[in-house]
Image: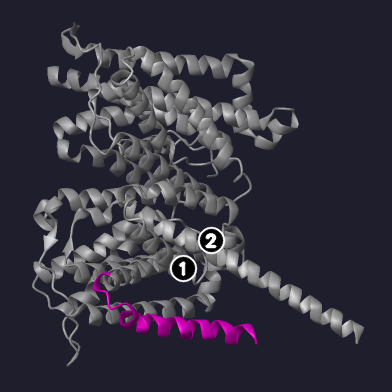
């Protein structure tokens, strides 16, 4: 029983990070209908910037995290301006290839700057605390709380503010949004900024309990895709729910099946889901 | 004068050049690189058939390449098959697995297909990596036999292997050429241009998409088999997603959906990589942006750019002719 609770908490931690990454991905998909394969690279860059700020410049973890969020947000906007904006009128294959090109470039760049070695990130929140009979590290608790707060802020932003409403409007109907006077260029840039912020936040939060390395984004981005397919491409609640579903099934699968195959679980889940429903579950019809 | 004669001359010239290549360089390392490039070309042709002509971007291609290589490796090393039987069976095994995966994968479209195949590719890689009992895990497979003799002709020297791979490449190109100029090829292109329209014309899109997918995996299987018997060591890394991205780079830079694209792209990038040895691990620093710039500014790749230029020149010439005629 204790093991199960512990694993459930681990699932909550992992799921929170997955949800953050998937949220950014799903927002971008909702706006531009692009599966942004380069999103995983943004995640990786976010972790490296936090790491560098802490190790080379000696900033506090939280300050480093904020700097990383802002920088990656702007890198993400730059990506939209330089790559996806010029490709607005092109075929789906071109979008995907361009995104892959960016992914390869950013990974190579990270390897050039920081080397291929695995880096360990320190955290000032390493103390172990007792939470209702569970022993958890402060860092894990922070991951869960920060992620949930970030999701609530995002939700309020989208539902309660005018700017947020323009994003939703554009996701629902691009031409319509344009017709009623929404500046679709600005909205696209804003969406990419938010996506970058969420990716960097997820990466910076989880890096102290994992490791930082150039290809760290690979698995996460693949799982984020699994999540947004489960949750319906472009659906925000779906991305959050899907993130936790994958997080829980992985940590429980790792305990009761085999930790060797925990990575396969989410992909097998996706393969099964798409086999039964090629449009993804919770899809609003039309791919 | 006419363009057919022209392109035929170019093709004959290129074949001659490829045949003479070993005598021009006399460098065994160059020969090795060239043979490897030919092997990649075969895989890229497979990818081109599916992504370029049918419009379905499969990101599991390295997985099928690896299946071909491992099928050959396991048949010869563990099952004790001879070279030729294994050489024939391995691509068929790949195509059979491709058939099963294609049946499911092709129910999805566009982005879903790309993501689905990306995950399938990753699963193939993980299975090869983790299933140590069968594949040897990270240690890989060693002791794969080189091509055995065809009658009195020995295929053990690098020179003979170069010609062997080249001959298969020519065969593959011929098959692809015949295919895309046949009704089947036209059907593929119709599906690429508009699947709904093709469907309304009475084309069985499911059947044709599956055919394209299976053929694509079959060529990947041939390339994998050749790779296994040429390098004679295989590890799980050949199924890595990075290899898929490499193949995609060759295809996009050369020209997706063109017949000469795979040759142009593969040769260019393989030789550029050779000359940029100091970059080695960082070569994607150049090829990543190149890939992105290519799809933004020249979606047809280098081949597309060339044929565009050629068509324009042709147009100008014919315009001149008509003007001259008018004056007369």
Mark 2 falls within which chain? B
Residue labelled with disc 1? B264
Quadrant location of the N terminus of chain A in the rendered image = top left
**Visible residue check, residue A172:** yes
| Residue A286 forms part of the magenta stretch | no
Residue sitting at x 38%, y 53%: B245
- Taking the image as shown, residue A42 lies to the left or right of residue A184, namely left
Residue A123 drawn above or below residue B235: above
Earlier sequence position, callout 2 versus callout 1: 1
The x, y position of residue A63, in whole percent, is 38, 13
**Circle number at residue B301:** 2
Q: Quadrant of residue A9?
A: top left
- Taking the image as shown, residue B142 lies to the left or right of residue B239, namely left
- Taking the image as shown, residue B106 lies to the left or right of residue A122, namely right
What kind of element bears circle 2?
helix
Q: Quadrant of residue B49?
A: bottom left
Closer to the camera, B263 or B226? B263
Residue A142 drawn above or below residue B50: above
The x, y position of residue B310, in whole percent, is 64, 72
* Image mark count: 2
Closer to the camera, B305 or A160? B305
Hey, which residue is sitting farthest bottom in the picture? B152
Per the rendered image, the range of residues in magenta is B1-29
The x, y position of residue B42, in whole percent, is 36, 70
**Circle number at residue B308:** none
């Amino acid at each position: 029983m204790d093991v199960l609770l512990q694993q459930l908490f681990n699932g909550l931690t992992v799921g929170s990070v997955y949800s953050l990454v998937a949220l950014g991905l799903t927002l971008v998909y909702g706006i531009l209908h692009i599966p942004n394969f380069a999103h995983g690279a943004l995640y990786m860059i976010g972790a490296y910037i936090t790491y560098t700020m802490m190790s080379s410049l000696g900033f506090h973890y939280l300050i480093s995290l904020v700097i990383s969020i802002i920088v990656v947000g702007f890198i993400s906007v730059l990506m939209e301006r330089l790559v996806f904006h010029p490709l607005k009128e092109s075929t789906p294959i071109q979008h995907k290839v361009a995104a892959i090109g960016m992914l390869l470039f950013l990974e190579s760049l990270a390897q050039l700057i920081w080397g291929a070695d695995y880096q360990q990130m320190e955290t000032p929140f390493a103390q172990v605390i007792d939470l209702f009979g569970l022993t958890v590290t402060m860092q894990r608790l922070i991951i869960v709380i920060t992620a949930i707060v970030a999701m609530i802020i995002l939700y309020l932003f989208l539902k309660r503010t005018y700017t947020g409403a323009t994003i939703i409007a554009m996701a629902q109907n691009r031409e319509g949004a344009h017709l009623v006077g929404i500046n679709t260029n600005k909205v696209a840039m804003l969406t990419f900024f938010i996506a970058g912020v969420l990716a960097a936040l997820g990466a910076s939060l989880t890096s102290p309990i994992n490791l930082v390395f150039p290809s760290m984004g690979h698995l996460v981005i693949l799982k984020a895709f699994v999540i947004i397919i489960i949750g319906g491409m472009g659906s925000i609640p779906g991305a959050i729910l899907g993130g936790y579903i994958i997080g829980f099934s992985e940590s429980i699968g790792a305990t009761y099946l085999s930790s060797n195959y925990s990575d396969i679980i989410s992909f097998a889940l996706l393969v099964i889901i798409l086999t039964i429903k090629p449009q993804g579950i919770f899809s609003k019809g039309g791919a | 004068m006419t363009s057919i004669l022209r392109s035929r001359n170019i093709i004959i010239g290129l074949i001659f050049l490829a045949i003479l290549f070993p005598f021009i360089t006399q460098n065994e390392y160059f020969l090795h690189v060239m043979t490897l490039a030919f092997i990649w070309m075969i895989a890229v042709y497979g990818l081109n058939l599916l992504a370029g002509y049918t419009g379905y971007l499969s990101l599991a291609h390295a997985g099928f390449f690896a299946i071909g290589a491992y099928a050959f490796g396991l048949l010869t090393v563990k099952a004790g098959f001879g070279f030729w039987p294994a050489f024939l069976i391995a691509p068929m095994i790949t195509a059979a697995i491709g058939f099963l995966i294609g049946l499911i994968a092709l129910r999805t479209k566009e982005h879903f297909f790309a993501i689905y195949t990306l995950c399938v590719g990753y699963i193939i890689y993980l299975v090869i990596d983790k299933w140590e009992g069968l594949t040897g895990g990270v240690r890989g497979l060693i002791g794969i036999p080189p091509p055995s003799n065809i009658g009195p002709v020995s295929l053990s020297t690098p020179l003979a292997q170069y010609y062997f791979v080249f001959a298969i490449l020519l065969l593959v190109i011929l098959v692809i050429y015949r295919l895309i100029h046949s009704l089947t090829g036209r059907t593929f292109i119709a599906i690429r241009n508009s699947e709904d329209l093709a469907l309304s014309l009475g084309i069985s899109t499911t059947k044709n998409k599956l055919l394209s997918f299976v053929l694509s995996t079959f060529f990947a299987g041939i390339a994998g088999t050749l790779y296994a018997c040429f390098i004679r060591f295989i590890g799980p890394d050949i199924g890595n997603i990075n290899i898929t991205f490499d193949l995609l780079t060759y295809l996009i830079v050369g020209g997706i959906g063109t017949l000469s694209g795979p040759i142009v792209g593969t040769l260019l990038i393989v030789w550029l990589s050779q000359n940029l040895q100091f970059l080695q691990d960082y070569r994607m620093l150049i090829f990543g942006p190149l890939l992105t710039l290519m799809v933004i500014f020249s979606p047809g790749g280098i081949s597309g750019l060339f044929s565009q230029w050629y068509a324009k020149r042709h147009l100008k010439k014919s315009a001149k002719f008509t003007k001259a005629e008018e004056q007369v």
